[in-house]
Image (spheres, rainbow, N blue to C red):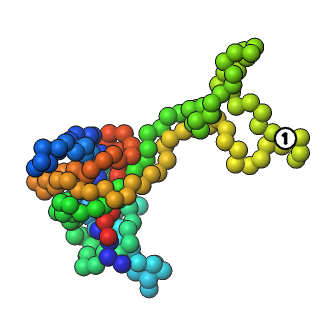
Amino acid sequence: MNMKALLGKKIGMSRVFTKEGGAVPVTVLEVGPCKVLQIKTKEKDGYEAVQIGYEPLKKNIGKSRKGKEFRYLKEFPLTDSLNVGDEIAVSLFKEGEKVEVAGISKGKGFQGGVRKWGFSGRNQTRGTKHEHRTLGSVGAARPGRVWAGKRMPGRMGSQRITVKNLRIMAVDEAQGILAVKGAVPGRKGILVEIRAK
């Protein structure tokens, strides 16, 4: 399977101007360079993939990481004509190409049902006291327990999210910068995966 993939970091948001004078919101990504560390084969590993490393480590490297001294290691479906030791840069992608970007969304901590699920809450009048943002009844007489999957308060955010069909608006090969149209999940500095078929 021929797939282009790279790792990078989210820098922040900006905008670019089109020839017609319109402003397009973009997310600026610092992409690569990534190094090919291992080629997985069906004969040896049972599947085909390429393992790449991003952001080299300079110290505190154990024996188990020998030869893979990178902060981030990821596997992607095998890309043709790659060899161990090859370096992949942002020039892999072209302006106007569509990509999908995956990252971890911002964590929002423990939230109630009103914020997490959009519940309306209880009455504001009619004697309601200290329960304006509570769920209300969550169980039933039978089976005498709360059904699995019930929307309840809990931790919100910090989930892997993939945004598809983001158009590349600009590529800066000298600085390793990629600008994609629209928003990308996560806070500034988060690790992102950029893939295109």
Please tell me whether residue 47 is drawn above or below residue 138 in the rendered image. Answer: below
Please tell me whether residue 113 is drawn above or below residue 191 in the rendered image. Answer: above
| Residue at screen point 49% across, 43% down | 158
The residue tagged 1 is 140
x, y percentage for residue 125?
A: 70, 15
Q: Residue furthest bottom?
A: 43
Disc 1 residue type (three-letter)? Ala
Quick check: 65 left or right of 14?
A: right
Quick check: 72 left or right of 139?
A: left
x, y percentage for residue 171?
A: 16, 55
Q: In front here: 38 or 132?
A: 132
In the rendered view of the protein, which quadrant contains the C terminus? bottom left
Other residues around mark 1 within 10 Å, as few (<14) / some (14–19) / many (≥20): few
Question: In which quadrant of the rendered view does residue 145 lie?
Answer: top right
**Mark 1: which secondary structure?**
loop
Whether residue 106 is visible to the viewer of this picture, yes or no, is yes
Q: In front here: 81 or 66?
A: 81
Question: In which quadrant of the rendered view does residue 7 lie?
Answer: bottom left
x, y percentage for residue 105?
A: 44, 44
Q: In front here: 56 or 188?
A: 188
Q: In front here: 96 or 174?
A: 96
